[in-house]
Image (tube, helix red, strand yellow):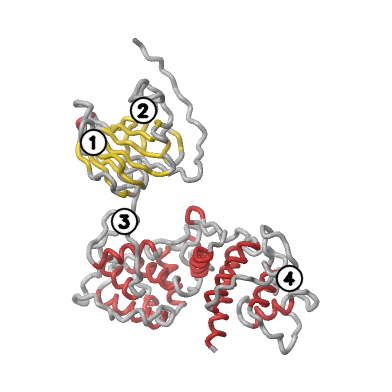
Amino acid sequence: MSTALTVVAAPPASADDGDPTFEVPFPCGEVWQGATRSAHGTGRDSHFPLDFNQGMGAQDRGATIVASATGTVVDADRYPNGRVEIDHGNGWSTLYLHLETLAVQLGDQVRGGDQVGTLGDRGSWGAFHLHYEQLRDGNPQHITFRHEPVVYDFVYTGGDYTSENCRPALRGEDGVTEGELAQWLYRLAATTAAIPAVEHAEGDDAPAAARAAGALVLGGVEAFADGSEADATVTHARFREVMRSFRHAYGQSIDEDDYTTPIEIEGDAEDPVTREAAATELYRWAGAPEVSEEDVPPYVDMPTGDARQAAWWLHDAAISRDLFADMPIGSAAYGEARWMSDHNEASGARVSFEEESFAAGETVTREQAASLVARVAASSREQTDTTVPGFDDPRSTVAQASPTDALTRSALASALHELAEAPPLLVRRPSIYVDAPLDLPAEEAIQWLTVEGIVTPTADSTFQPEAAVTREYMAMVLYRFAAYLEERSGD
């Protein structure tokens, strides 16, 4: 009986909300060949599975198989066919067959890239390979990797697939470098302060380590002014020098009431400081905040003991990585963006941050601004009242508009002015902005924001009162407004 050589065209690449992003089920960078045939497996759509090999069958025996995406192990049995199935939510699961050994048990939580077993021939009797399926509600689906569908030809020749299943490693025993330490400290400072932006001579092409060191120097961490090589390993003596300088510059920004532990790293002056030791010390410096270990560990090589929570914190607090992919180190509103994200989560504001993107240029609607401003005011005044003049208070002098309309700069100025219950300016000077004359309804609010340092004049002396407020602008203004409220409440 012959089989027709048929090519099945891939369906359009798309993903419903909640659908997982599947990766090739092998370690990062490995290249494997995936093939199928008609009547492959069981069920109505039995041509959808892929069989993976790299060499000639038995040469692949014992190769590492990893999870395609994060999920829960719902089936794990060596017999009769070396089976692991992982539930990824929303009805999706992945199936791995013919495993020689299993690295997971029923009920385990796994992250994409975690090992699930090794390649074998259980149930296939000498035919060493990985049989792989993606299922929805128990039915085989057209396989996709990163939402790109594979193309089936049914001649069992297959195509090459390069794994981008690249979960990070902490490398805790490696020495921490000058560049790594500068980036970690930059992000740590940005959790509690508006860290200075920096323009490097190399512009956007400047390495992140150079931008981090430059910004820290501007912030007063003089230890990085010596121009140390970014790839140089930090010694114990150097680490102590840097941490003393960092504490001098940012000690008041970080709650020292929660930080009572002195520098505890021990060793000879010229011994290298490991990444694990540096992470642990920074974690202590930050007050050893509580971390949750309910999720899957963020690194493939998680340490044990006290360093384990430090590793969780390093990742979850975005110290070892940027919180937003589009806000790299040195960005103008790096710290303010992190601060706004924290307030956004606490307030339930409808400002979505998708795929770890801040979208600095995206406009803010009136309803989004209302929830953010209310949260800032409530936290600064220790109140729970979330009525925000200018957004949702019918008594406001600011004209009402649709909640989904873009917020203008003049409307934001008027709202913050009313919310602060600021007294009238004693002296009405001519406006410093060419586009905010004295007869502009929001002119007094604009002048008040400028006098208090909440907004700063631009080089061309324009305020752009009717310009839509962007996320970046909102973050910077609200950060300074919160500082103003806190300072006033302490007077």
Mark 2 crowd level (few <14, some 14–19, many ≥20, 10 Å Cα):
many
Q: Pick whichever of labels 2 and 4 is earlier in the sequence.
A: 2
Label 4: which residue?
Answer: 398
x 67%, y 77%: residue: 417
Q: Is residue 172 left or right of residue 11?
A: left
Label 1: which residue?
Answer: 99
Which amino acid is tagged 1?
Leu
Residue farthest to the right, as pictured? 439
Q: Pick whichever of labels 2 and 3 is earlier in the sequence.
A: 2
Q: Quadrant of residue 236?
A: bottom left
- State the separation of the CA atoms marked 4 and 3: 49 Å
Q: Are marks 2 and 4 in contact (CB under 8 Å)?
A: no
Which label is found at residue 297? 3
238 up-or-down from 136: above or below: below
Q: Pick whichever of labels 3 and 1 is earlier in the sequence.
A: 1
Q: Pick whichever of labels 4 and 3 is earlier in the sequence.
A: 3
Which amino acid is tagged 3?
Pro
Residue 308 horizontal/vertical position (percent):
27, 63
- State the separation of the CA atoms marked 3 and 1: 24 Å
Label 2: which residue?
Answer: 158
Residue farthest to the top, as pictured? 1
232 up-or-down from 266: above or below: above
Q: Are marks 3 and 1 in contact (CB under 8 Å)?
A: no
x 32%, y 36%: residue: 95
